[in-house]
Each structure stands twice: as structure tokens, then as C-alpha cells.
Amino acid sequence: MEEREIVWTAPALDDLDDICAFIARDNPAAAARLSSRVMSAIERLTHSPESGRWVPELLPNKVYREVIVRPCRVVYRREGQNVLVVMVFRSERLLRIGRLL
């Protein structure tokens, strides 16, 4: 199977940075662990991009998938042979659909 390239959008990287910065105020080690867990989970998509679940709020639209890395949801889509990470948000928050379309 062909390996896919992971492409992070600037907003998705900003999302992850903001979440980790907030956590780091109280627990820098936890923030570093979260960042590492998110990157590892997304890196696995290079070999199996269909492994994430469809984003339930968007069904029946089957364009966006997500990987859950508590407390985050990482939303991505296939773009050609690449995996495009478009959003990271805390799972207790609502999905801002307008950022995806």
C-alpha cells in the first residue's frame, strides 16, 4: 500500500497549539504528551487514511473523517493521495462546520 503524505493546514496547527498552550498553563508535561499523542495518531494515517471514523455531525456527507485523541477531535479529509488535517478541537465543544466547507 502506498504511503500518504500528511499535510497540516495552518488553522489546524494553530488549533493544536492553542489547546496545548492552555493545558501547559497548569501542566506543561501533559500538554507535551497530548501534542505527541495527536501527532502519533495522525502519522498512522499515512498507511491507513480510512481508519478514522466519519464525522457524525456531517453525515451523510462522507468527506471528512476524524481521529479521537482525548480530549481532542482531529478532523481530516483525503485530498488526492494526501491526508489534509483541517481542524483540531476539544471534544466537549461543538464542531464549527463553517470552518470545513
Image: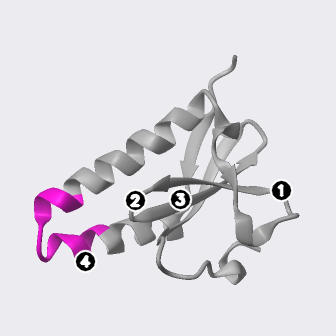
| Quarter occupied by residue 72 | bottom left
The three-letter amino acid code for the residue at tag 2 is Arg
Mark 2 or mark 1, which is nearer to you? 2
Q: Position of residue 32 (x, y in %)?
A: 21, 55
| Residue annotated with mark 1 | 62
Mark earlier in primary sequence (4, 3): 4
Q: Are marks 4 and 3 in contact (CB under 8 Å)?
A: no
Q: Which mark is residue 70?
A: 2
* For residue 84, side relative to residue 19 (left or right): right
Q: Are marks 2 and 3 in contact (CB under 8 Å)?
A: no
Q: Position of residue 59 (x, y in %)?
A: 82, 65
If the image is split into quadrants, where does the N terminus sit?
Answer: top right
Q: Which mark is residue 44?
A: none
Q: Position of residue 58 (x, y in %)?
A: 78, 69
The three-letter amino acid code for the residue at tag 1 is Lys
| Residue annotated with mark 4 | 22
Q: Position of residue 13 (x, y in %)?
A: 44, 63
* For residue 79, side relative to residue 30 (left or right): right
Residues in magenta, as a range: 20-31
| Residue annotated with mark 3 | 74
CA distance separating discs 3 and 1: 16 Å
Instruction: Name above or below for residue 41 compared with residue 85.
Output: above
Which is more toward the observer, 90 or 42? 90
Mark earlier in primary sequence (1, 4): 4
Which is more toward the observer, 58 or 35? 58
Q: Main secondary structure of the magenta part?
A: helix
Q: Callout 1: helix, strand or loop? A: loop
CA distance separating discs 2 and 3: 10 Å
Q: Farthest residue in the right direction?
A: 60
CA distance separating discs 4 and 3: 17 Å
CA distance separating discs 2 and 4: 15 Å
If the image is split into quadrants, where does the C terminus sit?
Answer: bottom right
